[in-house]
Amino acid sequence: MEQYTTVRRSSNISRAPAHVPPSEVALQTALEALADPVRRLIVRELAGSPDWTRACGAFGHLPVAKSTLSHHFAVLRNAGLLEQRDEGARRLNRLRRDEFEARFPGLLPLVLAEADRTGPGGRPGGTAGAGA
């Protein structure tokens, strides 16, 4: 029987995700990443958790499909906001708070402060301006 030496590896083998250092991110890229309310929720949840304790699967409560959630994580990685590492079957996340803050001073605190001014689901809370 012939042996095949040029057979490719299975495509479902996990590869480590690529990370962009915040120092190489353009302001436009950072702003576009933070423009999406689901991505801002991910950032705020990671900010409230110790590094490397939140797996991607822990965000299943967000109102998006799993494939869309994967896209959001990739956008955050490409904007220098998120670092991920594989640990067994889980992919753990870390907010690159200090590195991002050094590159874009004050931007991340604005995003994190938004939680104080929003209601459930990240929508503006309160009744101020209702009907105006």
Image: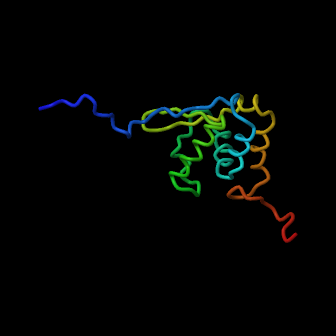
| In the image, residue 63 above or below residue 130 | above
Q: Quadrant of the C terminus?
A: bottom right
- Residue at image position (33%, 34%) is 9
Task: Please identify the quarter of the rendering in which residue 5 is found.
Answer: top left
* Count of numbered tags: 0
Residue 20 at x, y percent in the picture: 62, 31
Q: Quadrant of the N terminus?
A: top left
Name the foreground residue: 97 vs 29.
29
Residue 91 at x, y percent in the picture: 50, 37
121 sits left or right of 57 in the view: right
- Residue at image position (63%, 46%) is 42
Residue 112 at x, y percent in the picture: 75, 43
15 sits left or right of 26 in the view: left
| In the image, residue 77 above or below residue 65 | above
- Outermost residue toward the bottom? 131
Task: Please identify the quarter of the rendering in which residue 111 is found.
Answer: top right
Give the image's coloring scheme: rainbow
- Residue at image position (66%, 38%) is 79
Name the foreground residue: 58 vs 15.
15
85 sits left or right of 46 in the view: left
Residue 38 at x, y percent in the picture: 64, 52
- Residue at image position (28%, 30%) is 6
